[in-house]
Image: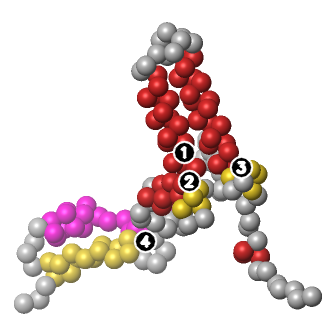
């Protein structure tokens, strides 16, 4: 007896229920019956035969019969689903690594700090020589003198020195 290995991709065989009809084809034919019954019962002159209901029922039945047909081994309805999913697919794919999908949301709670009083620092007063009144007047007049140069320097320890020197010409 000869055995053949069938790959797993080909094992999707449709079950035939009645003749060559599978389950989806039978559901489409039953759906046409329900649509025709709805047209007969819901439209005016309910549950009475009128001539305008006949073409509506014929169109509904014809559409369901078209959807039941097979093309290349597939039901027409599945081709419509396949093509519509293709035509309505997104055309551009944007990769964003900051996407929020499936991320845990982290909520930050701001804590208010209580204000505490700070004590003023006891700063040492800068040491300077006591200047006489005459030297003080000279110091005030030095920047206005064109023959003097005023320069400022900062120490490494935060001190500040101002020097006035005469320009020799």
Give the Cα distance between marks 1 and 2: 7 Å
What residue sits 57% from the left and 17% below the top? 41
Find disc 1 in the rendering and name its residue: 65
User: For numbered disc 1, what is the local secondary structure?
Assistant: helix
What residue sits 58% from the left and 50% below the top? 68
**Is residue 124 within the magenta segment?**
yes
Whichever of labels 1 and 3 marks the residue nearer the N terminus, that label is 3
Mark 3 or mark 2, whichever is nearer to me: 2
Disc marking residue 23: 3
Depth check, front residue: 95 or 80: 80
Give the Cα distance between marks 3 and 4: 96 Å
Find disc 4 in the rendering and name its residue: 159
Disc marking residue 69: 2
Q: Are marks 2 and 4 in contact (CB under 8 Å)?
A: no
When the figure is inspected, residue 68 is found, relative to residue 127, above or below; the finding is above
Q: Quadrant of residue 32?
A: top right
Q: Is residue 128 visible?
A: yes
When the figure is inspected, residue 54 is found, relative to residue 10, above or below; the finding is above
């Amino acid at each position: 007896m000869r055995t053949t290995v069938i790959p797993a991709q080909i094992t999707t065989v449709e079950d035939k229920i009645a003749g060559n009809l599978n389950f989806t084809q039978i559901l489409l034919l039953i759906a046409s019956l329900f649509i025709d019954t709805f047209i007969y019962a819901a439209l005016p002159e309910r549950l009475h035969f009128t001539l305008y209901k006949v073409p509506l029922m014929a169109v509904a039945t014809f559409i369901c019969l078209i959807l039941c047909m097979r093309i290349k081994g597939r039901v027409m309805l599945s081709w419509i689903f396949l093509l519509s999913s293709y035509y309505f697919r997104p055309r551009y794919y944007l990769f964003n690594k900051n996407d929020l999908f499936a991320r845990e949301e982290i909520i930050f709670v701001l804590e208010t700090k209580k204000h505490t009083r700070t004590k003023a620092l006891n700063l040492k007063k800068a040491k300077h020589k006591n200047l006489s009144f005459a030297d003080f007047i000279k110091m005030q007049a030095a920047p206005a003198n064109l023959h003097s140069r005023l320069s400022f320097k900062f120490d490494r320890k935060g001190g500040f020195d101002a020097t006035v020197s005469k320009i020799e010409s």
